[in-house]
Image: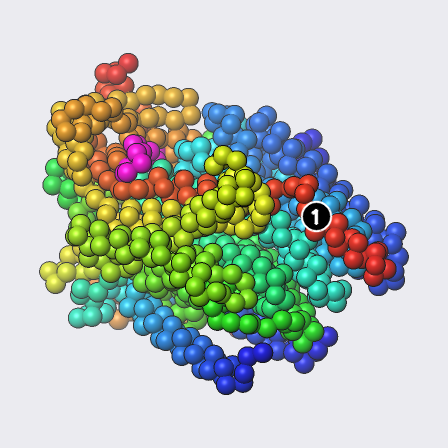
Amino acid sequence: MMGKKRVIGGVVALVIVLSGFGYLMYGGIGENLVYFVTPAELLERGDDAYERPVRLGGQVVPGTVRWNADELDLRFTLQDEDVHVEVISRKAPPAMFREGQGVIVEGSLNRDGVFESSNLMVKHSNEYRAPDDHEVMPAEKYRDLIRQTN
Amino acid sequence: MTRIIGSSAVIAALAIASYGMIAAVVGVKRREAALVRSARAAAYTCFGLMTVANLAMIYGLVTHDFSIDYVAQVGSRATPVFFTVISLWSALEGSILFWGWVLALYAALAMWITKSSLGSLGAYANAVLLFVSAFFYILLVGPANPFGLVSPVPLDGPGPNPLLQNHILMAVHPPLLYLGYVGMTVPFAFGLGALLSGRLDDTWLRVTRTWTVAAWSFLTLAIVAGMWWSYEVLGWGGYWAWDPVENASFLPWLTATAFMHSAMVQERRGLLRVWNMSLIIATFLLTILGTFLTRSGVISSVHAFGEGPIGTYFLAFMAVTLVFSMVMLLGRSTELRSEGHLDSMASRETVFLGNNLLFTAFTFTVLLGTLFPILAEAARGVKVSVGAPFFNMMTIPLCVALIFLVGVGPMLPWRVANMEELRRKLRIPGGAAVLTLAVALTLGMRDFWGLLAFTAGAFALLGNVQEFVLGTMARRRAGGGSIPRALWGLMNSNPRRYGGYTAHIGLVLMAIGITASSAFRMEREATVRLGEMVELGGYTVRFEELWAEDQPHRFVVGSRFAVLINGRERGEMNPRLNYYRARGSEPITTPSVRTRAHNDLYLTLLAFESDGSSATVTVIVEPLVVWIWIGSLIIAMGAFFSIWPRRRRPSPVRRTRNELQEAGVA
Amino acid sequence: MNWKRSAVGVGISVPILALLAFGMTKNPNVIPSPLPGRPAPEFALPVMDEPDTVRLADLRGNVVVLNFWASWCLECRHEHSDLSMAARLFEPQGVRFYGVLYNDTPTNGRTWIREMGGQYYPSLVDEGSRTAVSYGLYGVPETFIIDQNGTVVHKQIGPITLSRLSALIQPLLDEPPAPAVPVGGDEAAGTGVTDDAMEAVAGDAAEVTS
């Protein structure tokens, strides 16, 4: 049988280990929180808005998307209500990215007021979209390609 | 017609499960064997009815009966038959239906194997199994009714989620996950059965050992299949992102792994009895919590699942099971006290205790990180997400410590270690660890945790391999014949032990693969014109061609890249974009992966010019990825080896049956 | 059994469940919409298959129900009959229901309406999804309830039911909000209330008090 002293020692050791672990966890989680904000909320933060990692959610304003494939440079404007934030991403747009869609960009606002995105996530609802009037079905869009290969 | 058959089968199953549950409890209370027997028959009947319901749904899917709600949701005339059949589990209602079938199968099997041998314990376990089943049948009758009527009947449906019809692994991952998740219900039911019946000895543990190990193996395979799927489909070259959906499957795995180890301590030494009961209850509740989190839209996830009133049902069910099990567990805790005691710090028991401590910490970390967004919103009203860095920072040290224990465990015997022997066994693994560290340092690796992970990995790998080598050598000296023969004989002499060591080796291989592929990953994104090349990590890929193809259910834009190593052509790769017609115009990336033992070359087509002149691709080189998948297969092989039915030893069930007859219960 | 300890078990369980129950009430996928309580974004959209154009500004004084839908959306099928029923019930009391076709072709929309046995209220065509963007749409169906002053009262994500609609609309009819006081200048033009609307609101109020 283990002596009482050893039991107490064990309990003390356990408490120390657990509190150390708890402290680590507390600190770690505080440092790694990413806040969800809308463009309006982001700009409301004033000086605190800059250079802090956040997830910014809004709609891609139709007509603002510029994608330079050679430079891997993607720019567009995010909007919620009447607040606009310009976003720049150094990565190719994800396949499901399109104008007028809700997206979430992870990154931070630069001092020049441009939001630099490190990760672009397309918000998809459970429903999938049918093509709208302006978009031809891909088969037609890439008809040339098909003709070349067939 | 199909609809009517399916929904009647579900309703009948609900009625019969409810009856069986009550019959089992009343039967035990009034000591009426006939009632208890009828409760067992209820379990068999539910299995038959759920089989009918599932077959009806598959039939409805295959015949494109769009008057059935679920078929209208996930079916499409253009989808190939194979994907139509597996779309049984591609959306919420269907997966609950399938879950119901798996649970009914397990319950029927458990009752068929144990029959009346366990007396009141078995009857109560049956009641718990039927209670859980009844909950799923309620879902199927109410909020997740897959057999609802759609009127007017649509002519065609949208087809399953394209992400799911894009890869064959989606045929494998969900069934494995359900086999694993649902399998945990069986040990939970017998554990509660023990608490309810007051038969608090180790019977429930021994009876359910096979179930636990089997369910755990399925869960392991399911998690890795999920990782593999996201690696092969999602196109970012990763396999784990600490997404709530992933965490949901990982949490019960953590507690189940802890349980498998601490159960051995109880069987061997009579220790940790309250703890084991807590672990199995936690495991079951975590499977329900995981389903609740992912299916109710409580936590934000990149994996979009349907949301609906089903969350409330899961919450209510969780409330009932949590409160009930806590009441039973704590109420019986004084009677559950340990029989044995710890002899020495240098023993296998201690290692298992350490293992449990680490796994508990691990579970809490992942649970906290997953639930923190709700906590933060409740406490401060802010929307936050917990980033992957938190999980990595917290869990990497835990993983390293666990890997180290995987190495130490087999060296230590039960009770008290012989220090001389320990020192002898430490020599080779310790040497390998030091050597690995030195090699990694000279190769320029400076990442602290990476170095530790490799060192611990080498130590643990050799520590477990050594057991096989030493054992085989001893057997040969005793006249065991050739090396393979001696090895096979050794493994069969103690399947639990050597199956366990095999699983350890698989785990270490996985850990090494994960460490290497995340520490030495290289990635480049580039836009290339026809004939242009991208170089990365010893590979050169040259853009050869862009093509398009019209298929019945989808439209494919594909590319051809030549792979060059040292200027010589070594094959080609075809990353693609698939456009699923019925789901609109969102393309699904289909990366191309060239797998080799030392590294993977991973190519994703991101964008292209519609005249075929240029394409934007991501090139990723990741070392040792394939060992993650191989490791998981070795784990499963080891686990199944350890529980494979053998004639030599009396089965635990038979043993308990004898005990029962002695006690005069049955 | 030791019932004292059992009680401790209940004590441990309750906070965990309370937390999860709280989580149920929140939808993490939605960044809280700033719209409820604010003026609804203006729009002028053509009515499908009709030469008319509907302007939100012209509808002051009426409760407006705006339902974004599409033919490719299964949930829209589920809520369709409830919406039509609500329109039939509330239209005589001055509530205006409009569907807004989102990301879909009018041809598909027409076929769908025929398939569903008609739609009780007109649907508007949102070219280029600009209105959807200004309403911060995440997907369909989504339903917005706009009060007599043109303020968004509620945003429903996902299918809506008849009882939910009644619960939201009836209070607005029973107790119309006080008309927004025109401050003058541009703002008045933006959120202001036309004289007609003022009268309508006043009339409703009189009915209630009498």
Q: In which quadrant of the rendered view does residue B169 lie?
A: top left
Residue B586: x %, y % from top left: 34, 36
Residue B20 falls inside the magenta stretch: no
The residue positioned 83% from the left and 56% from the top of the image is B661
Residue B326: x %, y % from top left: 63, 70
Which residue is under mark 1?
B651
Residue B589 falls inside the magenta stretch: yes
Relative side of B230 to C130, left or right: right
Name the foreground residue: B522 vs B275: B275
Residue B480 appears in the picture as rendered: yes
Residue A70: x %, y % from top left: 12, 37
The residue positioned 75% from the left and 49% from the top of the image is B654
- Secondary element at tag 1: loop
Give the chain letter at badge 1: B
Residue B338: x %, y % from top left: 63, 72
C117 is higher (above) or lower (below) than B312: above
Residue, far top: A150
Residue A58 appears in the picture as rendered: no
Name the foreground residue: C145 vs B39: B39
Q: In which quadrant of the rendered view does residue B124 lie?
A: bottom right
Name the foreground residue: B471 vs B587: B471
C163 is higher (above) or lower (below) than B9: below
The residue positioned 68% from the left and 41% from the top of the image is B647
Q: Amino acid at mark 1?
A: Ser
Circle 1 crowding by C-alpha within 10 Å: few under 14, some 14–19, many from 20: few
For the C terminus of chain C, the image quarter is bottom right
C66 is higher (above) or lower (below) than B557: below
Magenta segment's dominant SS is strand
C162 is higher (above) or lower (below) than B597: below
Q: Which residues are magenta?
A: B585-600
